[in-house]
Image (cartoon, coloured by chain):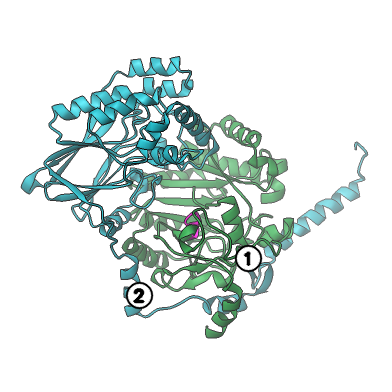
Chain colours: A green, B cyan
Amino acid sequence: MVAAEGQRQELTAASPRVALRSLDTLWFQVAGTLCNLACSHCFISCSPTNRTHEHMSLEQVRTYLEEGVRLGVKEYYFTGGEPFLNPQMEEILEAALACGPATVLSNGLLLDVERCRRLKALSEASDYSLDLRISLDGYDAESNDPIRGEGTFERILKGAVNAEEAGLTPVMTVTEVLQENATQQGRQRFLALLEARGIARPRLKILPVFQLGAEAERSGAYAEWQRLASTDEGEDGPGAESWEHLQCSSCRMVTDQGVWVCPILINEPTGRMGERLTDTLDSFPLDHPACWTCHVHGVSCKT
Amino acid sequence: MSQRIPEDEVDKEQRARRDVAVDKLTAHRGMATWGERLVPLGEFRQAAQGYGRQLDAAARQQQEANFLEPQADGVRVEGPFSKIAVFGGVYNNSYALEALLEDARRRGAEAVYCLGDFGGFGPHPEKVWPLLRQGEVRCIQGNYEASLSSGREDCNCGYADPRDNHFAKISYDYTATRCSPEYKRWMGTHPLRRRVRVGDHELLLVHGSPRQINEFLFASAASTPYLEVLLNEERCDGMLCTHSGLHWHRRLPSGRHAVNVGVIGRPANDGATHVWYSLLTDGGAAGLSVELAPLVYDHQSLAQDMRDEDLPQEFVETILTGWWTTCLEILPAKERARSKF
């Protein structure tokens, strides 16, 4: 551990550090890196065989929920991989919804009618919101399927419609992997598509892509200059206090391998901060090029 | 373009696509992704375990205590009063503000507090100013006052969706061009937070949250443990905020109170045209009483003024129907499910 930290010192000496202002958002890599898809833009290269991070058990999640409650977590987020591949996912959500609001990031493939009904029941049993986010990458099979996999366009929309019909008002998440997605026209096309499918109050979140994992193979990795230096300024001027627009100033990510600084860096061993949440309350060096994307694009993985 | 591709070429192309797909799906057998490389799973896990800390129980306790340590803000405590009225989000609605001042007086409020956002949404921003002054309203700055008094180009409402931001910009530009420099300067003279005592109860007054001027606190998205930690940090018996536009009150397990006092500028997305504010009364041995009070005002005249000023039809519709037509994307699932739009 000492040797690894030693090597790191050199890398990070020139990087600004971000303090954990408060622990508002707690993320769970609840399905690890296991997914029933292998999307070409996945920044953590999830696939059916990627066991870099494994499923978390209900007991593991509970341990961190208890810690989260003590530390005043405001909201919980669940991602993977595909969260609903985790056989304990619904029990995990029930436990989370007893502590605070929960959001699940899903690819929609496992959202059949029965599951959506059960999720609605979980949501109604809690005073807190259960938000469902479903990923889609194109307005039609032709644009979506090369990214997410053959036949996925229709299956994703079927899941979204099931969620809508159960009263879960899902948020569709779209990445800017197709450049048109980021434009006003692109947005309108998505909204029109969702309305045409019977989603009466369509909700949409558009995310930039990270040049990591499968996406780095697709579009190229980061260049040398795409890093934050200690001379870079946060929104309010230089210094550790100025990075409050970055989500790592108010979040942590838990996987079966421990606690990471944020949802983006779980495939970087250097992103691991400790075993328990209380091990990770110190500042973190913004030494990864993905930190640059968050800073420049003002990224938040939150809804 | 329309040249016919020979059948065996199609097969070849399909096979190649399938091979790539299968490669992608199976690439990680026994391997892990480390940055952009594939490495044996064991190598990644061993490296990861080498980073980060594993503190002992005593050190963890110490870390937690430091992290949660209360911060004194040095703000003078006003009062004590036995009853106060608190409102937020005027949004240029002078009709509702007039009605509120009258209602609060009638109901015996000894002091009236405004949690910010004087402007936005409605017509004729300057009409609110004399009412706030004559009514001796004790104000704090919302994001609107902070933005207008500092010459910021946007309202800093904190929306994340382009549609929400589109309408927010119309409101802000309308308000910014119709407020005098004197009014804007006056907005900047108010503090960002206040403390007031009602009976024995010390209440913290903020706009969004104690941490952020533009944080949205919705009932279904603010966990009770989060609110308890906030109140511990701030050493107060109750926290009053606005900003999100929807009123709620939660008595916490500790017996303390978290209140979103709502807004008087537009209805609460419930199909009714009245708006909401809060009354806090010292109940002696019974503790603090929190009342969320509906407020009826002349919404027809407001709607007419908005039309005369060419404000968006969407805004007028909200005033007349009680349903939000904009700023909906920020709502959590429960609040959104109760919306009409």
Q: Position of residue B183 (x, y in %)?
A: 37, 32
Side of B94 where B102 appears, left or right: left
Q: Is residue B272 visible?
A: no
Q: Nearer the viewer, residue A71 or B339?
A: A71
Side of B291 where A52 appears, left or right: right
Chain that bears disc 1: A
Three-letter amino acid code of the residue under disc 2: Arg
Three-letter amino acid code of the residue under disc 1: Thr
- Vertical position of residue B274 compared to residue A274: above or below: above
Which residue in the protein does label 2 denote? B60
Q: Are marks 1 and 2 in contact (CB under 8 Å)?
A: no
Side of B220 where A85 appears, left or right: right
Q: Does the segment drawn in magenta span residue B169?
A: no
Which residue in the protein does label 1 denote? A49
Chain that bears disc 2: B
Query: Mark 1 packing: few (<14 Cα in 10 Å), some, or many (20+)?
Result: many
Do marks 1 and 2 share a subunit?
A: no
Residues at marks 1 and 2, CA–CA distance in whole angstroms: 36 Å
Query: Mark 2 packing: few (<14 Cα in 10 Å), some, or many (20+)?
Result: some
Tell me the magenta residue range: A244-248
Helix, strand or loop status at disc 1: loop
Q: Position of residue A229 (x, y in %)?
A: 60, 65
